[in-house]
Image: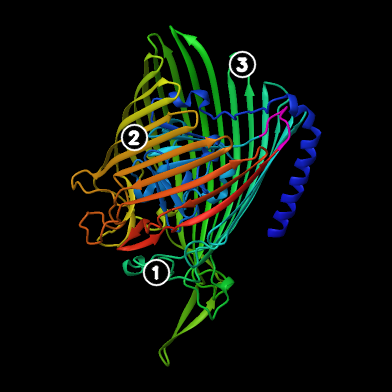
Amino acid sequence: MKHVIYRIFLFLLGWACFLTNVHAREALTTLDETHVQASRDGPDFKNLPHSVSVITAEDIARSTASSVSDLLSREAGLNLMSFYGSDKKASIDIRGMGDTAVSNVLILVDGVKLNEFDLSGADLTTIAISQIERVEILRGGGSVEYGDGAVGGVINIITKRGYAGQKASASFEATRGSYDMEDLRANFRGSAGPFAATVNLSQLDTEGYRKNSDLRSRNGSVELRFMPNEVLDMYVRVASHRDEHGFPGYVSPELFRTERGRRSTPSPLDRGWTDDDTYTFGLNLDLERYGKFIFQMSKRDRVNDYVMSPNSAILIKEQLDSIQSERKDYSLRYDIAFKLLGGTHSLSMGANRQLGNYARYSGSQAAGAHAERKMGDLDRRGIFIKDTIALPANLTLTAGARVESFRTNMSDEQYSQDCQWIYIPIPGIWVRGPCSPYAYRANNSQGGTWRNHGSEIGLNWKPVGSLDIFGSVTRHFRSPNIDELVLALPELRPQTGKTAEIGVRLNPVKALSISGTLFKMKNEDEIYYGPDSVLGPVNRNYEEPTLRKGAELEGSWQATDNLRLRLNAGYVQPKFVGSGADVPHVPRKTANLNVHWSPVTNLSWTFVARYVGSRFDGNDIDNTEVYPKLPAYAVYDTSLRYDFGKWDLTAGVNNIFDKAYATMGYNATYYPMPGRNGFVRVRLHF
C-alpha cells in the first residue's frame, strides 16, 4: 500500500508540474483565484446568537498543530481528551461534557456526521489537516438543525473542494518528525467545462511516543462535481480510510513519574485495524428567489477488528474481535428568503433519516465462530423548521423547532446448539441425544422507541456596527447509543436539557476583535457509565440533574503589520445538582495564547501556549479524591516557517519544556501524552 501511495504521489506531482507550465504565461498577469465553499449556515455564521469560532485555512497554515484534535483543542472552551496522544481514540469536549463528549459533541465533515452511532465517537484520523478549508465551531446550539447529540456543540469541518471554472492546482506536503513520524499528503483540484474534480491522498506512519502506540493511517478521497450553471450543483464523493494501531494502555502513578515509565505499556500485543468507507451523493438546486433545495445522502461502512490480551500460543487471526457497522443518512433541506410583515425572513426547513446496523463479535472461536454476538439496528427520523428574521432597530430574531423519532434494538446472542437429553433409568444417567446445528441464539434484548424535541430562540442586537449583543435559549437531547444498550438498566432513556447563553462581539477597529459569552446548561437524565448496586457498572441515567455554568472569551489583535496575537480562555463549573460534585474529567479552566510574528518578508514565527486546569479522576464521581486529581498542565509549542513562493519550509518543536501530563486517567492510572518532539515540513503548491 505504501508503494502505491508513493507512485500516486509522484504521478500527481508530475501532472501538477505540467499543468503549471501550461498556465505559466496566464499566471504572470492574473492573480490566483480563491473560492470558499460555503457552509450550510452560510456567510452569517459569525452572527448566530451563540458562541462561535472559525478556524480558516490561513490559521491552519500558521498553526503548529499537526493533527485535527490538536488544532481543535486550541479554541476557547474546547478540551482535548486523548488516550494515546494522536487523533486515534481522541475526542473534543465542549462545555464540560467529560467522558460523554463523544456522544454530546457532534463533528461533521462537509455536512456528514463523523460520529458513529456507538461509543467510538468521531474518528479524527479519517481526515488530514491539510484537506481542511475551514472549521466552524458552534457552542451550545445546533439541536434544531443537527438533532440528536448536539448538546455541548457542533464542529463543522469544511474541506477543500473543486468548482467549475477553477484553474488546476495541486499541493504536496511531506513531514518528518520525532518517533519515526512520516506524514505525506497530496491534494489536486481541477475542472473541465462544467465538471470539477478533487483528489486527496495522505499517509501517516509513526511509532508513537509510547511503546505499542504506533499508527499506520491511509486516507484517500475523490469528489466529482457537475455545475453546468448557477442553478445546479451535483456531486459524488468517495472517501476511504485504513489504519493499524496499537493500544498502549495506562500506566501507574509510579511509572508516570519517569520518562521511561511514561513510555512503557502494560499491553504490548493489543492492536486494532480499521476499514472505513463513505460514499456521498449531493444535489444543490438554487432557484434564486424561489429558494434553494439541498439534498444529500451518504453510506458508511466500517469494520474495526481488534485483539486484546492475546494468547501467544494461538494465531492472532483466531483471536480477533470485530465491530461491523453500516449507516445510511438522508437529508433534504429547503432555504428561502422573503419579506413579510416588516421583516426580512431567512427560512429553513428540512427532514432527515438515519438507518443503521451494528454487530460486535467477541469471545473464542472454538466452534468456528465467535462465542458471542451483539446485534443492533436503529431508525432515526427528524423534521425541523428555523426562521431568522431581520427586524427594524438592527434586531435579528431566530426561532426554530425539531421533532425526532428514534427506534433502536440491541440483542445479546450466544453461538450454541440445542441438544436433547435422554434419561436412562439404569444406570440412572443422562445421555445427550440429537443436537441442532450451531447458530446464534438471543439471550436477551433491549431497545425502545422515543420521540425527542429540540427548539431554539435567539436574539441579536447591533446598536452600532461594531457591537453585536446576542442571547439564546436552546433545548437539546441525546438518545442512548446502540452499544450503550448492551449493558444498561432496563429503564435507560434519552437525556434532555436546556442551554441559555448571552454574549457580546466587539470589533471597534479592523485590527481588533473581542467576544465573550456566559452560558448555563442543565441536563436531565444525563446518560453515563456508572455503578449499580445489583448489576455493577452499567449504562444508566444520572439520578441528579447536571448543571454547567461558565464563560468563553476570545480576542484577536493585529498589533502591527507583522505581529498578530490571539488569546482565548474558557471557564466551566460542571456540577451535579444536589451533591455539588464536579463531573469527572472536566477542567474548570482552559486558556490558549497564539503569537504570530513576521520579522522579515517570507519569514514567520509562531508561538503557542496552552493551559488546562486540574480535573477529578474519571471514576471519582463523588469527588472524594480517593484517587488524586489529574494535575493542571501548561504546554508550549513553537515553529519557524520560511516561504519560498511555490513552496515553504517549516520546522517546529512541540512541548518545548518536555512537560509530563495526561488528559485522562482512571483509578489513579494515567494515559501519558507525548513529551518534547520536533518536526520538519515541506509544502509545495502550484
Residue that sits furthest to the front in the current view: 600
**Does the stretch in magenta take in 424?**
no
| Residue 74 x %, y % | 42, 42
- Spatial CA span between label 1 and label 2: 36 Å
Residue that sits furthest to the bottom in the current view: 427
Report if the CB atoms under discs 3 and 1 are less than 8 Å apart: no
Residue annotated with mark 2? 552
Q: Is residue 606 above or below residue 232?
A: below
Amino acid carrying label 3: it is: Glu
Q: Going by the image, does 371 lie left or right of 78?
A: right
Kind of element beneath mark 2: strand
- Spatial CA span between label 3 and label 2: 38 Å
Kind of element beneath mark 3: helix
Amino acid carrying label 1: it is: Gly
Which quarter of the image is occupied by the N terminus?
A: bottom right
Amino acid carrying label 2: it is: Glu
| Residue 494 x %, y % | 36, 43
The circle drawn on residue 261 is 1
Report if the CB atoms under discs 1 and 2 are less than 8 Å apart: no
Inspect this view and state whether residue 488 appears: yes
* Mark closer to the chain start, 1 or 2: 1
Residue range of the region highlighted in magenta in the rendering: 162-169
Tell me the mark number nearer the camera, choosing from 1 and 2.
1
Tell me the mark number nearer the camera, choosing from 3 and 1.
1
Residue annotated with mark 3? 288
Q: Going by the image, does 512 lie left or right of 39?
A: left
| Residue 556 x %, y % | 42, 31
